[in-house]
């Protein structure tokens, strides 16, 4: 894999920010089991070094949690190795403690991740922009972000996965645990009927228009009740959801296994 830490100015945020990008590489070396998959992803021209005209590779937007940053997936899992074996690019953006929202007092992180980021990625690296090649996943706050993108822009994604997702932030009591986070993000307005109301969005969109959805949460996780509510609402709304509640807590051991299972589940075209 080619690994790039990219620093750039965001018009949406009005400041500099970062992302980490992993790109498949047709190369061989000690322990590089995924090289053949990368070569297939790069197309027939990869062998002679003339792959510029080849189609872009599939891409997974991989979102971080509340206390993390754009490097956390690399530092806590073997995502580079897992993605290499699948021949898929991975884009990991920096969104700070934003809940992937246009903050009431702060920056426009929803506009950034939903609008500016995919345009920037398409201009910067050779990934496919086709819906069938575009996926999103995340953990905790990032699981919320992944389903938020899927439910508000179903036309852009073939699949979305939430690992231990904070899927109903209105019930989190963020003001008690994280200072004035909820006030800064939502300004006391509440989220009912907004893009952040994932349970409401399940009832507002055509179930047949949605991407494939995958939910994974530990039965010992403090967020498991939120995930139960999402599962129940999806079933009531006839939304096709692959849901898995298994032993585990809000830990990187759980998510390291989870992201491998997500990559196996994604309908990645070869």
Image: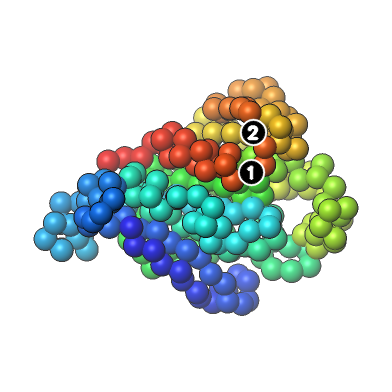
Q: Position of residue 213 (x, y in %)?
A: 54, 34
Foreground of the two, 204 or 219? 219
Residue at image location 85% in from the left, 60% down from the top: 179
92 lies left or right of 179: left
Q: Position of residue 41 (x, y in %)?
A: 26, 49
Q: Position of residue 217 (x, y in %)?
A: 63, 34
Asked whether the residues under the numbered discs 1 and 2 touch, taking CB atoms below 8 Å apart as contact, a structural biologist would say yes
Disc 2 element? loop
Q: Residue furthest front?
A: 30
Displayed quadrant of residue 102:
bottom right
Foreground of the two, 115 or 92? 92
- Within 10 Å of disc 1 (Cα), the crowding (few <14, some 14-19, many 20+) is few
Q: Which numbered disc covers residue 269?
A: none
- Within 10 Å of disc 2 (Cα), the crowding (few <14, some 14-19, many 20+) is some
53 lies left or right of 154: left
Residue at image location 46% in from the left, 39% down from the top: 260
Label 1, label 2: how far apart the Cα atoms are? 8 Å
Q: Which numbered disc covers residue 248?
A: 2
Query: In the rendered image, which quarter contains the C terminus?
Result: top left
Q: Position of residue 238 (x, y in %)?
A: 61, 23
**Whether residue 86 can be seen here:** yes
Q: Residue furthest left?
A: 48
Residue at image location 15% in from the left, 51% down from the top: 44
User: Looking at the image, how many numbered discs can be counted on the residues?
Assistant: 2
Establish if 208 lies above or below 263.
Answer: above
48 lies left or right of 139: left
**Whether residue 123 can be seen here:** no
Disc 1 element? loop
Displayed quadrant of residue 10:
bottom right
Residue tagged by mark 1?
Answer: 251
């Amino acid at each position: 894999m080619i690994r790039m830490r990219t620093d750039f100015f965001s018009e949406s945020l009005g400041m500099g920010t970062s992302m980490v990008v992993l790109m498949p590489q047709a190369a061989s070396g000690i322990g590089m089991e995924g090289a053949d998959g990368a070569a297939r992803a790069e197309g027939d021209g990869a062998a002679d070094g003339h792959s510029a005209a080849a189609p872009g590779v599939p891409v997974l937007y991989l979102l971080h949690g509340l206390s993390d940053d754009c490097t956390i997936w690399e530092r806590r899992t073997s995502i580079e190795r897992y993605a290499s074996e699948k021949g898929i690019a991975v884009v990991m953006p920096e969104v700070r403690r934003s809940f992937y929202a246009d903050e009431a007092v702060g920056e426009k992180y929803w506009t950034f991740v939903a609008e500016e980021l995919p345009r920037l990625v398409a201009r910067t690296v050779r990934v496919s922009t086709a819906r069938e090649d575009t996926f999103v996943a995340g953990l905790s706050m990032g699981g919320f972000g992944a389903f938020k993108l899927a439910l508000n822009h179903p036309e852009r994604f073939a699949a979305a996965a939430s690992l231990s997702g904070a899927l109903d932030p209105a019930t989190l009591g963020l003001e008690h645990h994280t200072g004035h986070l909820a006030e800064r993000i939502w300004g006391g307005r509440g989220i009912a009927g907004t893009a952040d109301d994932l349970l409401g969005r399940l009832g507002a969109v055509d179930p047949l228009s949605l991407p494939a959805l995958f939910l994974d949460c530990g039965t010992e996780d403090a967020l498991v009740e939120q995930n139960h509510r999402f599962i129940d609402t999806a079933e009531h709304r006839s939304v096709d959801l692959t849901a898995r509640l298994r032993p585990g807590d809000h830990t990187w051991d759980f998510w390291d296994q989870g992201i491998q299972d997500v990559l196996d589940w994604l309908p990645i075209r070869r």
